Each structure stands twice: as structure tokens, then as C-alpha cells.
Amino acid sequence: MKTLTYALVLGFGLILLPLFASAQSTDRSEMNQWLSMTEHQKDIPVGTTITMSNWQQHQDVMPLGMIKLFQGQYGWKMPADVQITVGPNHVGGNLPKTWVEATEKYGPQTRVELLPNGHYSLKNYYGGTPFPNPQDPHKGWKILANVFWAFVPALYVNSPANYGTVWAVDRFGDVAPSSLDVVYRWTAFITDTGFPRTETYAPGTWYTEWGMQETPEQARYTASLSLFYINQESNPYPDTYVFVPALRRSLRLSATSRCSPVFGFDWTYDDAKTNGFNGSTSVYTGDYLGDRKILTLAKFNTDGGIFPQGYDMPLGFPKPSWGQWELRPMVIDDVHRIPNEAAGYCYSSRIMYVDKEFWDGDWVDLYDSNHKLWKSIAYFNDIGDVPGLGRTWDGVASMAWDLQNTHMTVWSGFGNPGKRKPYLNFNSPKEYFNGVKYGSPSGLMQILR
């Protein structure tokens, strides 16, 4: 009975949202103060090391959530020995040739249509970055579209064999590890060489996300599948299915499950993607807030990702062993549901610090329905060498800090000595090319067979 109860709760994701009356919560107006404070930014000399003694001199290039960690007003705060060493940036030349060509070919014809019901519709998109130079009207939405369709390789795999591990940490420092199989795939608009332009195993979709728990034992074989549709007006939210081992069948989750935690972690279904947003562009939009230079880890030593040795605990912040940070040009976008779809949604604002080359949200500050700062999530997207693609995006490490409830989740696709990176494209074991098994509802029924 306990196993069945656990599986049902995990599968449905029907948990109570956190109480939002935290006295430590940050009012949304602080974002406006941050925008004013960072309007005239200073460069940081290469070789500068930021510590607890000098961080205030460099806060104009930090996301607001990082500033709050330095200020120490929450249960999660920067450790006294934190060090951020600034190195040169690696901006430019980091996208595959085929992706750049698709952007140049299709970008000029891509447009947005605002429908009578308030929904947004992307027109004439066939691959690459939809809006390489987003401008008004609807600039904030166009930035969101770039994030939604940001580049990642056609096939991304993390498994226990190559360090597919997530660590959940509570306020007492207790760590609960989980090992996962994760398979994310493009199914349409594919630009990577050697893949078809469109896959056939999930008709009508452009992306599929499959994940299954291997450990702990009581959650083993619990799996989740999300299908992202090309026609978002017919399917404004991704279809999400959960396989419940105790029932030996899968269940389709409702649209309200977008606020549910994935496998009980600190990411909701709308958070669980490498680029910081996993919702849709039909019922979400964005408000452009400005351009800034923001500190991030973009080319790091993957040995640093070993947990917990590579993390400054108890916060789980990257130690200097990860490598040097860099200033990268970013655009700040306030992403939220459109008004007629906002009722009951968990986040009032998703402040995204979006890299202007990759269009990844490298840092996200999430505000609850009362406009109080709830979570900060770092998505450190690494630049490395990918077979067949050259120097480009090759994986992500993420830390999600629940500031109101003092809980966090750490994910790293790196760190296992000898097996330090995720499988990408044709570097992946052949079994993961099985689209039906790893990308369709019928494939969920193959689990336990």
C-alpha cells in the first residue's frame, strides 16, 4: 500500500503548492530596482575573484537571485568561502553550421500572429533560431520563442551509465540521490546532419522528453513522457504521461500538472528543460526588460561536477574546480501566462536571463502567485566538442533553490570520472534511437516487459 501511495502521488504530481506567506519573500518590485541598479554596468577584469568581501562591487553583473544568496536573507545563502573567478568569454562561433544556415534561411520569414483568444501562434518556422534579432512588436514573446526552440543536439541522453543522477537536499543537509534515464529528442525541424528532418514515431510533435527513475527502489520504473506539438493552438500545453509501476499502466496528466514537481524534485514540468523553460508559446508570453551582461559558467571543467566534492555545501554552489566564469551578453525577459490562462498557475513571473547566442535561460528567478521570490534556478550550459557538430552546446548542470522552503535539487550531466558527459546524437548507445520506446505513450507500456 505504501508503494502504491508513493507511486500515485509521484505520478499524478498532486501535491499542495507551498504556502506563500514567507516573511523572507522578496517583493517583485525589487526586480525594478535591480534593472535600475544594473543599467550602467562596469566591466570586470579577467582574473578577478569575487568573494564575500567584495561581491557588492560586482553585483551589477549578477542575477537578482544570486544577489539574494550573497545577501544571505534566506535559509540558502552563499558559503563564507565562495569564490567566483572571472575569465575570458567564449562568445561567437558556438552554433553548428547547419543550425546557422537554417536560421539564415528561415528566420526572415518567421512571424507571430496574435489570435482573437489572446493566444500566440508561430508562423513559417522550419528550423534554427526563430527570431535571430527580435524586435517589437511582441519582442518579449519573440525572445520566449527563441528560448523555446533553442538549439540542443537532435538526441540527448543521460543515464546511470553516464552519470544521470539528481540529488535532493533538505534544510538539514540530508541528501537523497536518484538515478535517472533521460532521453530528449527533436522530432521535427531537425537540422543536425545524419538525422531526418522529421521523425515519424510521434506524429504532429516537434520534441519529446522521456525520463525514468532507476533508484531509489520504491520509485523504480516510474516514468514520465512529454510530447510537444507543432500546432500549439490545438494543443496549447504539452501532453504529459506518467507510467505508474504499481498500476502497470500510464496516466495522462491534466494541464494543471505543469506546476507539479517532476519526480518530486524542485523543478516543475515547466522548468525541466536545459534552457530554462518547458511550457509553450501559445498561452505564455514575455515582457522584454532590457539587455545586460551577466556572469555565468559557460565552458567549465566537467570534473568539477562530481557531487558533493565539486560543490560548495550546503548551498550546492559550484566550487572553483568548475573553472572560470564569464560575462555573456544576455536579454532579460519576464515570462508569464497570458491573462486568460493565468488563474491558478503557480508562477506569476519567470524572470529569465537569456544568453543571446544560444538563447538559453542561464539563470531563472521564479515568483509565486503573490509576486514573491520563490525559487532561483541556475542552468549552466556548457560549451564543448560534439561529434559531428563541432564546438557547441554539450550539456547542462543545474541547481534549483527553493528559497521559501529551504529545499534544493542538484542535477549534473557531468562528473563521473571516465564518463563525464551526456550522450549526444550518434555518440548515444543504439538502444536510445528507438523512438517508439523512448518517445511515445505506447513505449511507456514496454516498461516492466
Image (tube, rainbow, N blue to C red):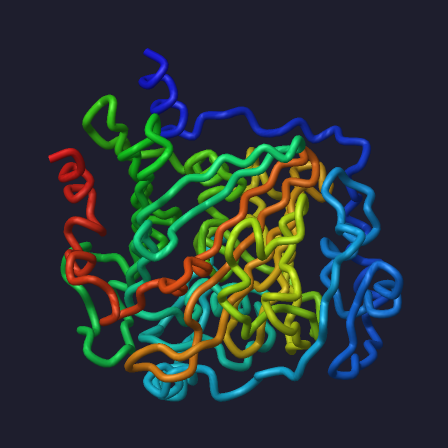
Q: Position of residue 429 (x, y in %)?
A: 20, 62
Specify the quadrant that holds the C terminus: top left
Residue at 81% in and 63% down: 51
Q: Position of residue 347 (x, y in %)?
A: 60, 42
Which of the 4 image quarters holds residue 446? top left
Residue at 63% in and 59% down: 318
Which of the 4 image quarters holds residue 27? top right
Extreme top residue here?
1
134, above or below 404, in the image = below
Q: Position of residue 225 (x, y in %)?
A: 30, 44
Q: Position of residue 48 (x, y in %)?
A: 78, 77
Side of 347 relative to 107 (left or right): right
Q: How many marks?
A: 0
| Nearer to the camera, 144 or 243 | 243
| Nearer to the camera, 289 or 352 | 352
Residue 117 visible in the shown view: no
| Nearer to the camera, 368 or 78 | 78
Side of 420 relative to 168 (left or right): left
Side of 288 relative to 146 (left or right): right
189, above or below 391, in the image = above
Specify the quadrant that holds the N terminus: top left
